[in-house]
C-alpha cells in the first residue's frame, strides 16, 4: 500500500525507515514522526450487509442468514449491534423462506393457492431469488 501523507502533520515528505513486524516503517521529514501503513481488513460488500440486515428484520435467525449468504453469523450480529437494528417482537411470527430460480419463481406465482392468505416478499440473491412468506392472520 502506498503512503500518501504523514498521519501526524499531513506532510507528503517522508522516507523509509526500516521494517517493524513485517510492515514498512516511515519517518516524516517535517515532524520526525515514525509511522507504518495501516493494515486493510477484509471488507464485505455493502450489498451483503444490506441483505443480511433485511433478512434479519424479516425474522430469519443469524445462522439461517449465514447459510443463505455465506457470511459469518458473528458478522451479522456485529452489524445488528453497530446499526442498532431492532426487530419487532412478536412470538407468533416466524416466516418460511425458499430460494428459487427465475423459472421456479414464475411457476410459483402462477398457482393461486400459493398467493392466497399470505404475504410474500421476493428479494434477489445473486442469480437466484429468495421468497419469504408469512401467514397474514395468525391467531
Image: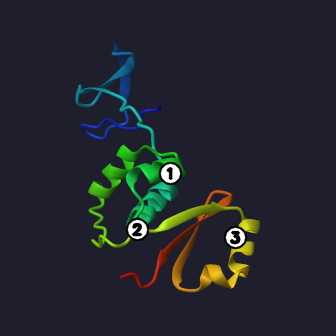
Q: Going 39% across and 20% down the picture, which residue do you hit?
A: 24
Q: Going 23% across and 25% down the picture, which residue do you hit?
A: 32
Neighbours of disc 1 within 10 Å: few (<14), some (14-19), many (20+):
few
Counting from the top left corner in percent of width and height, residue 19 is at 36, 14
Q: Which residue is mark 3?
A: 105
Q: Residue furthest top?
A: 18
Counting from the top left corner in percent of width and height, residue 20 is at 32, 15
Q: Which residue is mark 1?
A: 45
Q: Going 45% across and 44% down the picture, which residue do you hit?
A: 43
Please tell me whether mark 2 sits on a helix, a strand or a loop. Answer: loop
The quadrant where residue 33 appears = top left
Q: Is residue 39 left or right of residue 113?
A: left
Front residue of 39 and 122? 122
Locate the C terminus by quadrant: bottom left
Please tell me whether mark 1 sits on a helix, a strand or a loop. Answer: loop
Counting from the top left corner in percent of width and height, residue 87 is at 31, 68
The quadrant where residue 28 appears = top left
> From what the image shows, is residue 119 above or below residue 74?
below
Foreground: disc 3 or disc 1: 3
Pick whichever of labels 2 and 3 is earlier in the sequence: 2
Neighbours of disc 3 within 10 Å: few (<14), some (14-19), many (20+):
some
Q: CA distance from mark 2 to mark 3?
A: 21 Å
Pick whichever of labels 2 and 1 is earlier in the sequence: 1
Q: Which residue is mark 2?
A: 94
Please tell me whether mark 3 sits on a helix, a strand or a loop. Answer: helix
Foreground: disc 2 or disc 1: 2
Amino acid at each position: 500500500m502506498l503512503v500518501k501523507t504523514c498521519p501526524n502533520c499531513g506532510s507528503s515528505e517522508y522516507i523509509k525507515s526500516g521494517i517493524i513486524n513485517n510492515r514498512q516503517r516511515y519517518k516524516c521529514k517535517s515532524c520526525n514522526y515514525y509511522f507504518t501503513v495501516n493494515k486493510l481488513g477484509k471488507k464485505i460488500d455493502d450489498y451483503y450487509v444490506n441483505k443480511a440486515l433485511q433478512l434479519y428484520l424479516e425474522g430469519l435467525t443469524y445462522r439461517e442468514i449465514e447459510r443463505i449468504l455465506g457470511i459469518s453469523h458473528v458478522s451479522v450480529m456485529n452489524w445488528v449491534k453497530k446499526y442498532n437494528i431492532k426487530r419487532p417482537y412478536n412470538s407468533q411470527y416466524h416466516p418460511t423462506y425458499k430460494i428459487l430460480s427465475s423459472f421456479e419463481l414464475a411457476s410459483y406465482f402462477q398457482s393461486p393457492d400459493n398467493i392466497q392468505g399470505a404475504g410474500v416478499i421476493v428479494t434477489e440473491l445473486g442469480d437466484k431469488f429468495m421468497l419469504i412468506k408469512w401467514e397474514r392472520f395468525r391467531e
